[in-house]
Image (cartoon, helix red, strand yellow):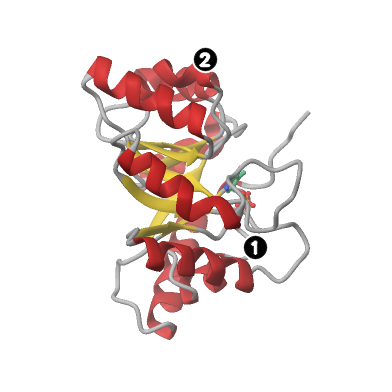
Amino acid sequence: MSQALADIQSRIAAAEARAGRAPGSVTLVAVSKTQPWEHIAPVLDAGQKVFGENRVQEAMERWGQRREGLELRLIGPLQTNKAREAVAFFDVIETVDREKLARVLAEEIQRSGRAPRLYVQVNTGEEPQKAGIAPGEADTFIAACRQTYGLAVEGLMCIPPFDTDPAPHFAQLRAIAERNGVEKLSMGMSDDFEIAIVEGATSVRVGSALFGSRNYG
Ligand SMILES: *Cc1c(COP(=O)(O)O)cnc(C)c1O
């Protein structure tokens, strides 16, 4: 039993209803990075199946022994030298953002015969410190993923700048998806997931509102 999970689920349902979206059209990705197991266990026990992690190694340590029946998503930046492990371990990689990574993922998918679903991360705020393809390069990059590397792009993902109105960023991500025929939108976190749902999110990535604030140490 997890009261926090029940609360987030009902807030998602309410936002779906307000936005005129079908019930259940938004997937909750529970972001378990850096959380102690005693925060995660009640959410897992309550039936949550989809979890997001920022780091390949940390995710494998946390989930490697209890992976069965779960969907694990990589939502943090991926280095090409970790691509092999990421392809082998994750069901979804949400942070494809450069040609070199697209090429290495394509090679690894070919080699291993295992194909995680892929999202392209867009740096909607064009922040230099943040990962993601620039919005002006997104169309070209999505086309390259598909045509040059033979990758299926399931969705787009963004992390709007801290302390700004996220709605225009979500709207921009949706516009990029629509004009490129991309189906899914991973957008919205603890502080803004309801806004993201109104703007068309198909999955929201919620960490601290579900598990408590993270201790980065
Ligand atoms: C940590 C993280 C989240 C969750 O953030 P909260 O504000 O704790 O909900 C979502 N998405 C990404 C990419 C993250 O790194």
Along the line of sight, the residue nearer the viewer: 98 or 35:
98
Q: Residue at x 36, y 18 (%)?
A: 65
Q: Residue at x 70, y 53 (%)?
A: 126
Image x and y of residue 122, in percent: 56, 51
Q: Residue at x 56, y 51 (%)?
A: 137
Is the shortest distance between ligand 1 and the CB of mark 1 under 8 Å? Answer: yes
The three-letter code of the residue at mark 2 reads Asn
Q: Which residue is mark 1?
A: 191
Instruction: For residue 159, say whether it is visible.
Output: yes
> Does residue 107 sit above or below 141 in this rendering?
above
Instruction: For residue 2, say whether it is visible.
Output: no
Q: In terms of secondary structure, where does tag 2 sit? A: helix
Extreme-left residue of the structure: 113
For marks 1 and 2, give the one nearer the viewer.
2
Q: Residues within 10 Å of mark 1 (few under 14, many from 20)?
A: few
Along the line of sight, the residue nearer the viewer: 208 or 93:
93
Q: Which residue is mark 2?
A: 81
The three-letter code of the residue at mark 1 reads Asp
